[in-house]
Amino acid sequence: MIINGRGISPGVAKGKIALCDDYVSPLGEMGKDGRIKSGKCEDLEFKGKIFSFRGGRGSTVGSYVLLELKENLTSPIGIINEKAELVVLTGAIISGIPMIDGIPLNILKNDDDAIIDGKSGRLELLNVTQKDVSTVYLFHGDRLLVLHRSDKVSSYQNQFSAISGHIEEGETPEEAGRREVLEETGIQDIEIEKTGKPFPVRWENIVYMVHPILARTKSDKVNLNWENQEFRWIHIDELGKLNTVPRLKEALEELMKL
Amino acid sequence: MFLTKDEEKIFDGEMGEAQAIAIRLLVSIGEINGADSLIPIKSAHISGVSYKNIGDGGLKFLKKIADKVKVPTTLNPLGFDMERNGPVEVDRDFKEKQMEIIKTFMSMGIKESFTCTPYYFYQKTSYGDHVAWAESSALIYANSIIGARTNREGGPSALAAAIIGKTPNFGLHLDKNRVADYEVEVNGKLDYSGAAALGLYLGTNYPGKIPRLVGFNYLRDFELKAFGAALAASSATSMFHVENRTPDDTLNRGKKFERIEIDYNQLKNLMEEKSSSEKPELIAIGCPHLSKDEIDYIASLVKGKKKDKDVEVFLFASRETIKNSFESVKIIEEFGAKVFADTCMVVAPLSKKYHKTAINSGKASFYLPMKEYGGQEIIFRNFNDLLRWAVVDY
């Protein structure tokens, strides 16, 4: 899959991802041997990899640390940040290490095969494919419909989710949402209230680009198909207590704020 | 980004390679961050002075970029005290490389300040000045307490700004980015170390966000210095406000913020969790470097007292601060403590000799336990608690 961030330091790097879901202080935390020395990502090897972390922190000397690592042949070959700050950015530019930002780290896994273009901000993940899905949060009054996925579906077996399915070619997210509601619950009368910003969720070698939809129905009769084993009409406060697919609650909260 | 005719000439290399590298770095940074132009700066402060930190790669870069600076420019501390030697021995090769770095900086017309607190004595910085400062503890002080305007410069970008005399206009140079993101209240009174612990807590839990402290008017500038240093070490946050106190708090008037209430005991626990229970070999004070007021205060506490011979006490401040605190420094030295200039507990290789170090600094508590700093055991307490170990019959 291809995702476009922002180009920071020019050049192209091709290699494996080394992922640290935290902020990193190059001074003190990025060791001369090419490994992280302390904190949440202790022992992670970034040498020769595309080092992906949230952003820089700590000492403003950090820029020189990247230069010294490069000199030592123990630097990363590329850098990905969620949001770049000046210290790491300057370090990447003066060391000639390609760097991009604006990439959500949750689409990455350690050892992904990646190519970054530090000029255009483009990231290509060679081992990952992207699939678009619609996720419909369906309300009846103040109750939300959650479905307990069966063990026959291809992903997130036995977890709770909203009504979700692939967007077929030529379909809009709304059309796919209506079709999935009908297939999975038998409900026809739905009114789409709003749609949210699509967000990525990583599952094995797939990134699902989830298009969230908020909809209402007057019907509370549900006929499940094979994809789910149980349904519940719940109050949204109960969502936190269920074992759900990733970001189900957070995405609903963002959708309701819109 | 708009460049003037003169800036374009520099960019095209007509003024030599060093200036071209400098302006190209500034322009890249500006374009990435949506700056409209370069703006003149009043001063610059450079981090990345210690050979331990910048290494051979840094030295090579310095030589390439070495050109005269256009504004008053100060330097961060290095690995040892040039006059007194110490606080620990450094080997000859290290010293030679360090002197080569200093020589390169001096050839550029940079001041021999060697301090992380250039705002004491060295830099005359005022409210509203645009500056380009590296050193996270200094730049957060400049933005918050002085009300000057600087981004969180990396060592090389601050140097590039000094050489050109300008910096890209974005981020904290603009009013709109200097407004608070949230408010903080604590149900107890904080001292120097408590303020530092609060900085660590906020840096870790709200990275990159600008806090507005509510009900902290009692904190003195040097306590806010400790708070800011800890906040800026544990995150990329480069500014804070104190309600009705810091100069740019006017930008927050009439705005509503999410308020976070922090339990005083939580901060005490944070300090305890970081602390070893063993007796320290060394008590290190002055991260960031001490002010004249702080040195005078310490002198008043140890005057006529005797130091425990099993514990070393090191103080760190700038040359000018030490010179201006002559009487107090004498009292402190008679007590048996040592006062060092040019260097500090973070950049001097203390772990060569000391493995259990007691500190009152949140910033030091962030760095000293790191493996790259020798993985020191630390004791993080307030200054009065530390003195109990140092003074006979305290």
Image (tube, rainbow, N blue to C red):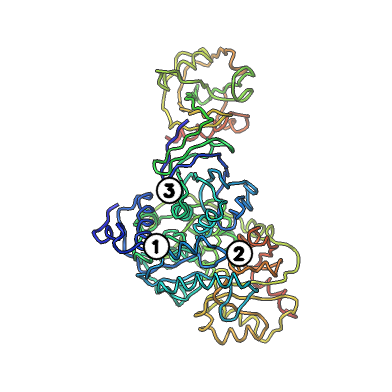
Badge 3 vs badge 2, beta-carbon distance below 8 Å: no
The answer to whether marks 1 and 2 sit on the same chain is yes
Check disc 2 and give the amino acid type: Ala
Q: Identify the residue at horizontal 61%, vertical 50% (top origin).
A: A36
Q: Which residue is mark 2?
A: B364
Check disc 1 and give the amino acid type: Ala
From this view, report whether residue B37 is shown above or below residue B59: above
Q: Nearer the viewer, residue A77 or B200?
A: A77
From this view, report whether residue B202 is shown above or below residue A158: below
Q: Secondary structure at mark 2?
A: helix
Q: Identify the residue at horizontal 45%, vertical 23% (top origin).
A: A215
Badge 1 vs badge 2, beta-carbon distance below 8 Å: no
Q: Which residue is mark 3?
A: A9
The answer to whether marks 1 and 3 sit on the same chain is no
Q: Position of residue B179 (x, y in %)?
A: 41, 55
Split into 4 quadrants, where in the image is the C terminus of chain B?
Answer: bottom right
Chain where mark 2 sits:
B
Q: Secondary structure at mark 1?
A: helix
Q: Which residue is mark 1?
A: B160
Q: Is residue B337 visible?
A: yes
